[in-house]
Image (cartoon, rainbow, N blue to C red):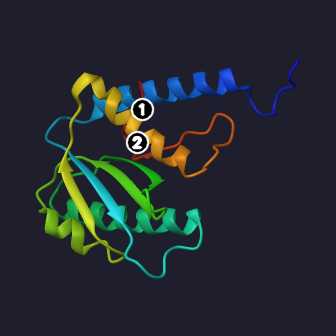
Amino acid sequence: MEQRGTKSGERQRMRNLLLSRDRLARTLAANFTGGDLLVALTYQAGPRPHSRELARQQVRQWIGSISALRRGQGMAAKYVYLLGTEQAGSLVHRVILNRGKESADVLGHTWPYGPVYVSPLDLSQQGQALASELLRQPLQAGHSPLPCARLWVSSRGIHHT
C-alpha cells in the first residue's frame, strides 16, 4: 500500500491529468469566448531565463503591463497562462487573454524578450482540444507538478467550475 504524500502510481497520475484537463477546459469555457486571444510569448535566441521562476516573473510583469493598459481604458484583464516549451526546448508562455481594445502590435511591444504570436481563441469541443494541448507542453518539458498543484495560473475573478 502506498503511503500518503508519496508519488502517485501511474494510473492515478493519468487520472489526475485527465481531471486537470477537464477542469481547465471547463474554466476556459466558463470565462472566455471565441473572440478572445491565445497569445504565445517566446524568447529570442541568446540569453534566456535561467530558471522557470524567473520566466514566471517575466510573464507576470507582462500581464501587469497589460492590466495597467486595460485599467486605463476602463477594462479588466482576464487571463489564464501556462509555461511550456517548444520543440527546440526554449520556453514559451501560452496566455489565454480576454479581448481588449489594444492591437496585437501593442501586445508584442510590451514583451521585450522575443516574438509574440497572437491568434483567435478556438473553444470548439468545449475546449477539450485546447486544454489538452496547453497541458501537454508543461508535462513534456519535464515539469513534474507537486501533488495537487495546478499547471496553470489564472487572474482574479476567473470562475473555476
Whether residue 155 sits left or right of residue 149 in the image: it is left
Amino acid type for the residue under numbered disc 1: Leu
Residue 158: quarter of image: top left
**Residue 98 located left or right of residue 18:** left
Label 2 packing within 10 angstroms: few (<14), some (14-19), many (20+): many
Percent of width and height locating residue 150: 55, 39
| Dot 2 and dot 1 residues touching (CB under 8 Å) | yes
Tell me which residue sits at (47%, 54%) in the image.
83
Element assignment for label 1: helix
The correct choice, above or below, for 60 with respect to 38 in the image is below
User: Which residue in the structure is indicated by mark 2?
Assistant: 134
* Structural distance between the alpha carbons of marks 2 and 1: 9 Å
x 82%, y 33%: residue: 6
Query: Is residue 58 placed above or below 154 in the rendered structure?
Result: below
Q: Residues within 10 Å of mark 1 (few under 14, many from 20)?
A: many
Q: Position of residue 142 (x, y in %)?
A: 61, 50
- What residue is rendered at 68% in x and 42% in y? 146
Residue 33, numbered label: none
Which corner quadrant holds the C terminus?
top left
Among numbered discs 2 and 1, the one appearing first in the sequence: 1
> Residue 134: x and y, percent?
40, 42
Which residue bears the numbered disc 1? 24
